[in-house]
Image (cartoon, rainbow, N blue to C red):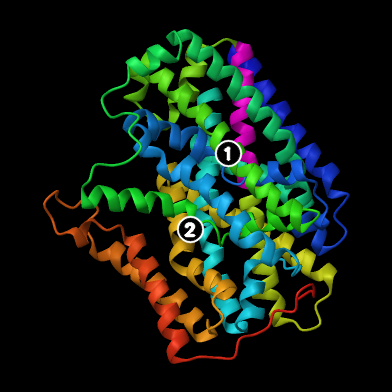
Amino acid sequence: MQNGILLSFIELYLLGTVAIGWWASRRVKTTADFVVAGKKLPLFMASCALFATWFGSETVMGASSEFAQHGLLGVIEDPFGASLCLLLVGWLIARPLYSLNLYTFNDFFRIRFNKKAEVISAFFMVPSYFSWIAAQLVALAIVLQAVCGLEREWGVLICTLFVLVYTYIGGMWSVTITDFVQTIVIVIGLVALATDMVLQVGGFEKMAAAAPAGFFQFFPEAKTGDMIGWVAAWMTIGLGSIPQQDVFQRVMAAKSERTAVSACYTSSAMYLSIAFLPLIICYCGRMLYPDLLEKDPQMMIPAMVLQHSGLGMQILFFGALLSAILSTCSGAMLAPATVMGENLIRPLFKTMTDAQLLRIMRWSVVGVAIVTGGMAMMRNNIYELVGESSALSLVSLFSPLIAGLYWRSASATGAIISMIGGMAAWLAALWLLPEAPEQNASVWLHIPPMLYGFAAGITGMIAGSLIWPERRVEIPVGEQP
């Protein structure tokens, strides 16, 4: 009976989200409305949109389970690295790019380097989202399976169709307005559950006393392998997600340059503070119900809420969980669709109108949904899927983006070599290096494949620009590319 009522509330919540998306779609008249919400977002809405970029399954289910098993060192990547990324975007990216009126990062690669760099960067950026979106769809399916026993395959299909509908009709306006509502639900639900769990275990003093030795250790042991892994964890999202289209679109949707920068800093603080709530909840669950951790760690919090909480708390929690996942998934689905339309398809048609481009971007959303839904059918580990996504953009796109902004001698040839070389080195390292090297193995075997790709990207950027220098392209600030 209680599960039936909870399921009814979930259905109402999902229908309400679609209704908000449909209402927001009335604002979509042009491609700019669909992609960057007409650049009209005030500070709080822009901050909520940026906060929601990654606050999804990775944070609530993936990172919390890692924290329960491995302590603070297990969550350097998220939430610490994710919060660092938003801070760096505000510091390095938002101000120089906002006034250019760009739709995508790849537009910048075109006007700073050339069309070939634009296309190559787009080919690397689009697939970087597939694993990320698949992770969110897996999480949504897991929630439905926990609540009503729905098979995961059917859950993935239903959730894919649902996210597709309201992203397709409303674009960034739907994403932004639903992010705003969902952020409120997230905070209320997680604060209520965290407060209840802390009271159940007897307060923070008992929580600290029950922690195993080194559980709250922030810095690793002074071993080469541990230090390298710790730095790599910071970099995965902290640097790897800087050249990501979903972050870029949310920054560009702000109503002014100052608002865009402030929204980055505000969302960074929001993310770091609110993301600790699921960690606290999972740690309390580790103390109260250790048997749940031995089953599927990703399902610990949902299972704990279903088995040991009342209906009111279940509604608050699952409302928060669904909000977190949906807000991440919708923006992530829109991002590669925008790149496909703007940077891969539009250049093929010289006379394309704005209305035709808008139609292509919407159909690109459908294509992304089909691919990522298929991936979600075949994969199940949320944490691994998210890590793959950020690593791909780090090794291929980070170095040419930063060099293009801050190094006057950066050339198109250097950018292309950086992207291809970084990707090739990363894939080669994934293939050649052992997944779990022995403790006394060479230090080179302990270096994560991502760092080999990152180093190759930097080397390619510098060497290519010095060997094949080109005249720096002066960016026409304020002009539409």
Helix, strand or loop for the magenta stretch, by majority: helix
**Residue 449 drawn at (x, y percent):** 32, 61
Which residue is depicted at the point 81% across and 82% down? Answer: 351
Local crowd at mark 2 within 10 Å, few (<14), some, or many (≥20)? many
**Residue 462 drawn at (x, y percent):** 43, 80
User: Distance from label 1 to label 2 (Cα)?
Assistant: 17 Å
Which residue is depicted at the point 29% across and 53% down? Answer: 228
Q: Quadrant location of residue 28?
A: bottom right
Instruction: Point out the stretch of residues depicted in magenta.
Output: 311-329
Q: Nearer the viewer, residue 374 or 54?
A: 54
Q: Disc 2 residue type?
A: Gly
Residue 464 included in the magenta stretch of the image: no
Residue ID for mark 2 = 240
**Residue 179 drawn at (x, y percent):** 70, 40
300 versus 53 height, above or below:
above
Q: Nearer the viewer, residue 258 or 313?
A: 258
Q: Disc 1 residue type?
A: Tyr
Q: Which image quadrant: the C terminus?
A: bottom right
Which residue is depicted at the point 21% across and 62% down? Answer: 444
Residue 161 visible in the shown view: no
Local crowd at mark 1 within 10 Å, few (<14), some, or many (≥20)? many
355 versus 263 height, above or below:
below
Label ID, residue 271? 1
**Residue 428 drawn at (x, y percent):** 30, 69
Q: Nearer the viewer, residue 59 or 84?
A: 84
- Please tell me how many numbered marks the rendered image carries: 2
Residue 326 included in the magenta stretch of the image: yes
Which residue is depicted at the point 36% across and 61% down? Answer: 450
